[in-house]
Image (cartoon, rainbow, N blue to C red):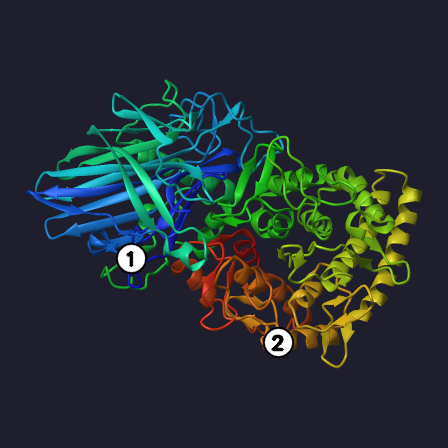
Amino acid sequence: MSDLDTREWLLTNGLGSFASGTVSGVRTRTYHGWLFAATNPPSGRTLLFSHLEASLEVLGNVVALGTNFWGNGKIERTGYDLLRSFDINPVPKWNWGQDNWQLTRQLLMPYGLVRAGDEGQGSRGAGEQGGRGAGEQGSRGEVAESFSPLPLIPNAQFCDRILIQYRYEGSHTAILRLRLLIAERDFHHQQTASQELKFSQLLGQQQICLQAINSGHFGIPWHLRWTQGNYQPDAVWYWDYGLSEETKRGLGDKEDLYSPGYLIVTLQPGDAVTLEARVGFPDSVSGVLSPKTFAEAVEAEQERLSQIFGWREGGRGAGSREQGNNYESQMPHAPCPMSNAQYPLNQQLLKASDQFIVYRASIAGPTVIAGYHWFNDWGRNTLIALPGLALVPQRFDLAKGVLRTFGHYCRHGLIPNAFPDVNGEPIYNSIDAALWWIETLGLYLEATQDWEFLAEQFPLVQQIYKAFVGGTHFNIQIDATDGLVSWDAPGVALTWMDVVIGAHPVTPRYGKPVEINALWYSALCWLSQWAERLSQMEFGDSVRLTKQAQRYAQQAQNVKTSLQKFWNPHLGYLYDTIEPDDRRNFQVRPNAILALSLHHCAFSEQQGCQVLDLATASLLTPYGLRSLDPGDPEYKGRYEGNQEQRDRAYHQGTVWAWLIGPYIRAWQRFYPQRSLPFDWQPLLDHFQFDAAIGSISEIFDGDLPHTPRGAIAQAWSVAEVIRHIK
């Protein structure tokens, strides 16, 4: 496997559905497949369509174009040996060939929010494609007015589908065989062949409808259709695919896939065949699948992105065909370096950022997938990522919608850290999500001057304030002696360092964490400013608001004084926590940098410079900040092994890419005249050429060579780069 190109690609559709795989085509993860459909957006992700196994016959010579790794260690690699190039933009594109022929394959997952009646019109821009997912058993909900990553779509419904196009060039007629590999399983688990699991197939005119039947229970119906070719039923199981990345992670690493049959397509030079896999039974509103469908869908996606980000028409945007990131190979050797001069970096980053913006059916509003492949949306992550995902690109309606939705679910002064599916309850296991909500609201207001929204949300701001002062869940309360936020609850971890193994947090951080109290100070400063502004704008009782502004300001000053308790003069750094028994935790962690990076900062210039100097020496890497100083006895420099081993390393030295944003903001505050001691190039090379091509990983090893780990595409990693890259 070592010489196969296992870098990954990712397609998403705004509903939580996705497609993903590797450059070489070998499946290395449980999360690799061409249609993971979010049956309850963005949750309920189910693998329906794994892939098409292709072979090409020219002049009687048949070559297999697949690349597979089997559970017995055998590698089938003919496809990779024939792979000449791979592009990522505007869509993933593979090019196989020999002297007398070449075959290309392109994949596209169209945006999933569509308007009834228009769904077959692939050339329409985003927000104007439409229709029910073919044969969906009724719509799975309507787009609420608060969901505004794009203009409101009347009567919008959901459509999960993927388009595939093969194009042949050569000197002679060719025969393309496409064997269909399918599944019906949750995206976290593998499929195993059994007598109880069967698949029904109903063949129609250039289409086949498929549905799993497991122990008498019917699965999700979906169908595949094509523009030309003859389908041959030929049911067979393919056993024992090996999933090497899952082996490394100590998880299930074997998969069985079912094939109901294969498609035979005769291709003349210049011919193409287009296929579409779509959730639901076939119906009449799906539109005609034609040779133009794929190009029209690419154009529609280009237009959608252009509308969102204001890219000029005809410019070098995400869709310009000539701008593709071309992984020209001397395949199967390592890809050659490529140039992105024709494809602006900022547009690549914005395109990547859009993959995380999704619609959540249970709240009828927008949210942010924390990362792919396995994360759902998380309150803390969303709020930290929102400035980069929405404020910098001026997606102000999106930011407003997320803030309003999250605020709606505030209970007892806490913002959910995780939203439920339909009829479920939010999870409120976070001390800082509510404080990040206030901080992000402040940044939104600074960017938009939307004071009417402030007037709307100010009662909620006061509710959070009163809950923290009066005490709320997890013994979260303000210490009356110093005005600092404290908490103490066994068996949970409420800060962003939140791993719990069994009932034991790895980094418990009970008591008074430094960044939580820095957020509390910033929140009080915001409250004082907002009360004063509202009093001047006559949005309420001006006398009462003025008095509140004064009280908040005085409380902020008291907290600023108390924050000096975190100063460790011997180390020139901030204590990470003041524990419930008043002991200080002196570990060097990046939470001190978070405390320096907020809009309002309570620490002096001298303190800030000393903290930055030590963090630069011990935590800074080319990919972000380590979560613990390598000199600490608890430091773990590699994030690998089984689940428990990885959990114990998660916040004990692992590098977090998103932390580069707070570091830069702190540096610019305390060293405004000095160059940033950080070279962007390694992280940008990672974004363009490594791991998930066109995105940024969640974490990296603390030790050299800082191997990327965790989720291959992480929202706050991308968002923080967008905030600061020039």
**Mark nearer the N terminus (2 vs 1):** 1
Relative image position of residue 172 (x, y in whole percent): 8, 41
Element type where label 1 sits in the image: loop
- Corner quadrant of residue 681: bottom left
- Corner quadrant of residue 173: top left
At 26% from the left and 51% from the top, the residue drawn is: 67
Relative image position of residue 277 (x, y in whole percent): 35, 32
| Residue 703, above or below 662 | below
Relative image position of residue 424 (x, y in whole percent): 64, 34
At 83% from the left and 38% from the top, the residue drawn is: 539
Q: Is residue 254 or residue 684 the one in the foreground?
A: 254
Q: Residue at label 2?
A: 633
Measured in 3D between alpha carbons, the distance from the residue under mark 2 to the one under mark 1, in whole angstroms, is 38 Å
Element type where label 2 sits in the image: loop
- The three-letter code of the residue at mark 2 reads Pro
Relative image position of residue 444 (x, y in whole percent): 67, 47
- Any part of residue 90 in sight: no
Q: Residue at label 1?
A: 73
- Any part of residue 110 in sight: yes
Q: Is residue 602 or residue 323 the one in the foreground?
A: 602
Camera-near label (2 vs 1) is 1
Q: Are marks 2 and 1 in contact (CB under 8 Å)?
A: no
